Every structure is written in structure tokens, then in C-alpha cells.
Amino acid sequence: MAAPLGQAWGAPLGLDAPLEELLEGVTSEELRGMLVALGIKPPGTRQQRTAAVLEHHGDPQRVAAVIAKAPSAARQLLERRAKSAAQHTDFVVLGAPMADVPPGERWALDRGFLIHNHHGYGPARMPAEVTLTMRGPDWRAPFDPVPPVAELVPVPAVEVEGEAAWAATAFAAHAASVLSACSATPPARLKSGGIGARELRRIGKAAQADDAVVRITLEIAHSAGLLGADGDRIAPTTAYDTWAAQEPAAQFADLLHAWWNLQFTASHARDEDDKPLPAVAGAPRCGACLQARHGLLAAAAALPEDQGVRVCTDLGPLVAWHRPLAHPSIHDETPFAAAVREAELTGVIARGALSRLGAALVTGDRKELAVACRRLLPEATRTARFGGDLTAVVTGTPSARLAGLLDSTADRETSGTASVWRFSADSVRRALDTGRAPAEISAELTAVADGTLPQPLSYLLADAARRHGRLRIAPAACVIHSDEPALLAELAAHRALSALGLRQLAPTVLVSGSSPDKTLAALRGQGYAPVAEAADGTVRIEKVPPRRAVAVPAPRTAPTNADTGRSARRTAEAPAGVDPSALAVRLPATPPTDPEPDPFGAGIPFGTDTEEIVAGHAKQLTYTDVRQLAHAIDTGSAITVEYVAASGSRTVRDLGHIELDPPYLEAWCHLRDAERVFTLSRIHSVMPAWADDLA
């Protein structure tokens, strides 16, 4: 068992790693220092020095003799560390190692009684040989052959079975309600996976169950294959339909078996950081959680007959004795409180003792578990008591057929050992919306009624049926109407117009499933002459205005001598019949075209591309301001602008190191003494820089 136990515990019996393992990260010079401090002449090689330290620390008498002469602080530190469990550090802290060490630790480090890891971070570790020497030759590993003593109280078996039956019946009813709610409206799935808190609250409200029951039901149903991912939803599988058709005892047996083998604690709602956990999110396997559940039932099974613990949480300390590999949850107020709570909710433990359900689980026999469930849980209830207050009450667990009927015609108010549904006009309307006839609903309710239907319920059904369907909503893309019924009847029977989906609502009204334009085109294609109507009923005029191009204004001023050649080249027309191949050869060698005239109508062409870009965005600037701002951008010189912020406030900014990024300017603002981004359209004027040093 030594090897398996070594894998289960990193530091069994509070012992750290052997000295040979801890010395792997120690340098040869550090080994030399240890030997010198111990009064041993250090040999030459590292291997020889390691062997010398191992030989010294392997002799308990030599180690004890050195520690007996140690300073009191070092001796007390070593004694304290020998009694406590080993300390491990699974992370490396960035930065320099801590310079301050506890009193006496330096003396122990120098002699190898404490050893730092090769990084120098984390607490110093005590070799197992030193720990055993400090504990003394008379120390023995602790062994408790008898489990801890818990305070016991007499509990008759009949009371245990009665409370277990009540808890199992309530859980089975709530579980059926939870899964029925998921079947009616599958919960949405988070992008990260699982069912979030909002959907859990919705399901709990619909099933009248608390969060713990909802979580446990969803987790074990998912584990049993009753629920599965369906795109962005968690929906029941086909196995759920088979499960829902069974008796409550068989349903509960399947859920209980899945809970017994669950590899995590289903009721956990928060993580280590106290953040809410989604349900059915694929929790990692936790062998310790399974061991806690099995250890809890083993501890309860070991109690004397007809006796139980005073409080169920008193079973927690016994779990660790029966299952040493189990560990409680970080959120448990008492040891293994979550496992105890789940066992109580399912009826496995009642009155601090093991019930027949728990005993069947311990044996692992599914047939025995099914027998125990049938013995504790009553058969499904197939009738309901209908009251004059428009309620239906079902004691016990309703059958799948009864629950489906009442869920489709009424709203569930409570679930558990007794379930209550309430009828209303809206609930009956929902049933009628599914296509069921009023007489059919009345007959189905009468068949499951424990007596006759009360008069108020019959009146409600009749009134809802009378009002249902008085208004009808039909899909239509457009309406065709005419004063000639014969013409509309002809259109409805026209085989060539069948693609429009025409349907006659009245002698003078047709509805079309196609758009108005498509309907108009189809009718005109068959030789009819329909007209289109606007939304207000007036005839829609279909006159299309002629399309015209926008003329470019000619320059109103004569160009300068320097611009004459460029203007002539720009306005010259290309000769007719130009060879495309010859044109392709000439185009790369042709000088770039001149910029277009400015939009201000002066006829003066832009001198640079920057001017043209600035003018296109800075609509508030004159042509002079555009040229001045473009010059500052191209030359990198400073400029002063009047700027209107988004809030409407006007400021004067001195800008330097300007870069153009249309429709923005990036510049150093001397007012804010920082780099800022300015919108070109918010610049209202440009002036020369006020100071010579702004550039």
C-alpha cells in the first residue's frame, strides 16, 4: 500500500520529502557550507558532498546531538515544524526572495535541517529524516481503530421510514415538476456552458422548488441522460419521455442511483471566489466528493440499530474516519454539510439515521433500491379534487398523464406531497389555442375528477370557449379589394396566380401572401389593370421622374499663366479611336492630373491634395484658412485654430506636430499640454501661430 498511499497524500503523516529529494536543487557550494557548519570536512565533488550530508542526517543520534546545542529560537522552530504538517508551495512569487526569515531559521538552513527550494521562494521545508528525529524514537503514527463518538438518541425505525417517505415523495414530485418545466420551455444555455442563475430562478418558480432541489435534479437528470444540449438550449432527451411515463417510485429510483454515482456535489452553487456557478456546466470530476457521499452513508450504516445522531451534521466527523480521501467543501459551515443536506432532501438519511433507501444504496443492488422506493413512495395519483375556487388538488405524486393535463389547462401553484393547480381564463385559453375543443377539455377533466366538476369551473370553460376565436388573425403581405365580387372570385380561382397565395376573406376582399409590388406585377402580367393604394387609402401615383446628371460648373476666372498648360491638358478631349494597348503604355508616364477646383466657386484649383482633403471635411473654413491649415500640415509648422467642442464651448488652441487622419487631426495641444485629436468639421477659423516656439 505504500505506493498508492504516496500518490494519495503528498505529505503522509505530516512528513515532507526525503532529504535526498530536497537536496536536488541545492548547489555544490551550499552543500559545502552545510558540511562546514556541521563540523565535517567537505569533500571535493558535489556527489561526495551530497553523500556526506545524507550520511550525517541519516543518523538520528548525530542530528539530535547537533540540535541539542542549537540556540533556543532554532530549537523551538524545529520542534514546532516537526509537529505540524508539511508546507508546500505550488506557485512561484515574482520578485526577490524575502530577506526576513523567522528567528532561528537561518541556523537551521545553514545546517540542512531546513531547505529552501531551488528558486528560493516559499517556506523552507524540513526533510523527513529531521522530522522523525525531532519526534523521537517513541513516536508512532496515529491510529484510531474506533470511529469518533457521536451523541446518539433513540430513533424508532417507523419514524425514520415515515420521514424518509415524506422527503422522498416531496423530492420525487419536485423533480418531476422541474423536468416538466424544462420540457415545456427548455432553459437557455450560457455561452460558457450550463444553465445560468436567471433560468434556474425561472425553473424554480415554475416548479415551486428551491434552488438546491432544482440544481440537484438538473445535475442528476443530465448525468442519467434525461437532459442534453440542443444548440443554445438544454432540452429533455428521448429517454425523458420513457422516464416520465414510469411510476414515481421507478422515476425516483433512477434519479437516486444517478445521485449516488455522481462525481461531484450537485448542490454546490458557488465557486472558491463565492461567484455563482451555472448548473449542468460539466463540473470536473471530484473523487473526494464521491467519497464523501459514500463515507456519509457508511458512517450512518455503522450506527446502532434504532439510534441516530441528535443532529444530522454530527455525521460529518464520522465521514473522515470512514473515507480518509474525502474532504469537505470550502463552503461547508460544518464538515460535509452539503453531502448531509443532499442525503436529507432525498430521504436517504432521516432523523439522523440511515433509511431503507440509504441501506439499498450501500448494497449497490438496483433491484433492492427499486423495491425500497416502491415501499416508501405511493403509487402515482390519477385523480384530482376540483374545488369551487377554481383549484385542483392532487395528493402525492400525480401521474404523468394527470400532470400533463393540469399543466396544459391550469397554472401550478405548489408542488410537493400535495400539488395545487389554479384555473383561469388565460390558462383555459392556452389549452384552446392548441386546437383542443371545449367539449374535449371538459371531458378529460371530468375523467380525472374525484367527483363532478364544480359549477364555477364549468362556467369558466364555457365562457372561455364562447369568447375564443371571435377575432381571427390572418397573415397577409397585401390586400386586394374591389366592388366586383365576380372579379375577385376569378382571381382567387386563377391557376396562373396560385403562387401569390390568394385567399378570399369576403366577397370583395382577397389577401395575398406576396408583397404589393410582386402582386401588382403578377396581375398586370395576366392582363389585369390594378392600381396601388397608399397606407391612407388614396391611390398611389407611380410616375417616375426622369433621371438627370448634375452639371459641373465651368471656371469663372481665367487661369494664371502657370496654370494654362495644366488647364488645357485637363479640358482637352481624348481623340476618338484611341488604341487601348497604346493608352495603357502611355498612362504610367503621364503626369498626375491637377486637383479639382475648390468648392467655393472661385475657380482656383487646389494646390495640393492636402488642401482638397481638408476642404472636403472642414466645411466651416474659407479657402484661405484651408490653404493655411494644409500648409501647416505639410510643413509640420505650428498653427492656431478656433475650435468648437462637442459641448458647444469655443476655445482657441495652439497646435504643433500636426498629422492628418481624415476626418481628424492629431496634434500636440499647448493649451492641454498633451496630444489631442481634433475633428476637422469643428475647426471654425485658422490663424498663424501666436508664439515662435510652438513648432
Image (tube, helix red, strand yellow):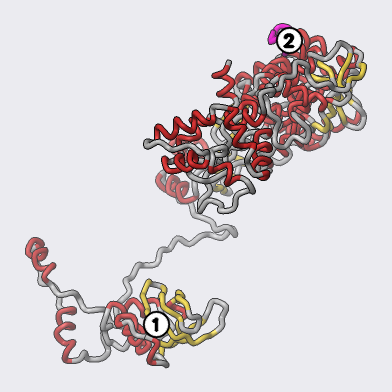
Q: Residue at x 75, y 21 (%)?
A: 296
Q: How many marks?
A: 2
| Segment tinted magenta in the rendering | 360-369
**Secondary structure mainly formed by the magenta segment:** helix
Q: Nearer the viewer, residue 143 or 662?
A: 143
x and y percentages locating residue 438 in the rendered image: 77, 27
Please state which amino acid type lies under the numbered disc 2: Ala
Which residue is disc 2 drawn over? 370
Residue 540 is left or right of residue 170, and the answer is left
Q: Which residue appears at 68% of the width and 39% of the height? A: 270
> Quarter-wise, where is residue 443 in the image?
top right
Q: Is residue 263 above or below residue 332?
A: above
Q: Is residue 568 visible?
A: yes
Q: Nearer the viewer, residue 663 or 515?
A: 663
Q: Which residue is mark 1?
A: 656
Circle 1: residue type: Gly
Residue drawn at (82%, 22%) of the image: 167
Q: Is the residue under label 2 in contact with that under label 1 (CB below 8 Å)?
A: no
How many residues crowd mark 1 within 10 Å: few (<14), some (14–19), many (20+)?
A: many
Query: Residue 585: horizontal and vertical position, in percent?
Result: 8, 64
Q: Position of residue 408 (x, y in %)?
A: 74, 28
- Is residue 391 positioned above or below 597 on the image? above
Quadrant of the frame with the C terminus: bottom left
Name the side, left or right, on which 368 lies relative to 417: left
Q: Residue at x 34, y 85 (%)?
A: 637
Q: Which of the marked residues, 1 or 2, is nearer the chain's N terminus? A: 2
